[in-house]
Amino acid sequence: MKSFILSISILLLGGASIAQQNTLVKSNNWTPKVNNTEVEISYKLADCNFVMEGFHNEYMLVKYKNKTNQNLRLEWKFDYYYNGNCANCNNTNGEDIYTIELKPGETIEGKCEWPTKRNTMVFSKFLNRNSNAVLTNFEFTNLKIVKNN
C-alpha cells in the first residue's frame, strides 16, 4: 500500500493578538476551520445536556470530511484557548495529540453523545455552574494528512 505524508503546520488565525479574541461563532451551521483539497474540518458550538451525568455544558462539535477517493489518516495537536489564553500550548506529554481515520468521501460529525468522543467534541463552557472559563479559540497545530491507496 502506497502512502505519503503531507505535513502542514497550521496556525489558523495568526498570532497571539488574534488568538486573544473570541473567534468562535455560535451558529446552527458548521463553520469551516480547515479547507483544502483533501479535507474540510468544520465546527459548531452546541448546548449538550447529559441529564444522567449531571452535565449541562456547551461543547464545540467537530466535523471531518474526506474530499478524496483515498483513505486518509489525520493527526494533529489541538491547542485550546480559554478566555484568550492557551491552556495547553506548552504541553509536550502527547496527551493533546489526536487522530482520526476517514474512508474515501466519508464524513464524521461530532454529536452531543455521552461518553464524549475525544476527537469530535471539545469542552467549551459550563452552562449549569458558575464559571467564567469559556473556549475562545482552538488550533489544529501540526496537522498531518496521510493518504493510503
Image (cartoon, helix red, strand yellow):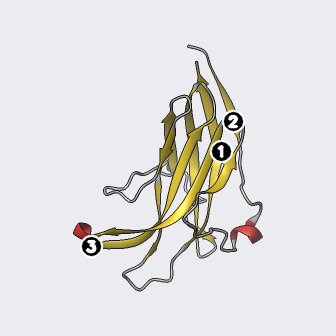
- Mark number for residue 142? 1
User: Which residue is farthest bottom?
Assistant: 130
User: Which residue is farthest top?
Assistant: 1
Secondary structure found at label 1: strand
Residue at 69% x, 46% y: name it: 35
- Mark number for residue 114? none
Closer to the observer: label 3 or label 1?
A: 3
Residue 2 falls in image quadrant: top right
Look at mark 3 in the image and give the residue it sits on. Answer: 54
Secondary structure found at label 3: loop
Q: Earlier in the sequence, mark 2 or mark 3?
A: 2
On screen, residue 35 versus residue 97, left or right, reads: right
Q: Earlier in the sequence, mark 3 or mark 1?
A: 3
Residue 136 falls in image quadrant: bottom right
Question: Whole-percent x and y of residue 42?
Answer: 60, 53
Which amino acid, mark 3?
A: Gly
Residue at 69% x, 74% y: name it: 21
Nearest the viewer among 27 and 119 is 27
Question: Quick check: 99 above or below 13?
Answer: above
- Mark number for residue 7? 2
Question: Quick check: 147 above or below 142?
Answer: above
Alpha-carbon neighbours of circle 1 within 10 Å: few (<14), some, or many (≥20)?
Answer: some
User: Which residue is farthest left?
Assistant: 52
Q: CA distance from mark 3 to mark 1?
A: 35 Å
Name the quadrant of the N terminus: top right
Q: Earlier in the sequence, mark 2 or mark 1?
A: 2
Q: CA distance from mark 2 to mark 3?
A: 40 Å
Question: Whole-percent x and y of residue 58?
Answer: 45, 70
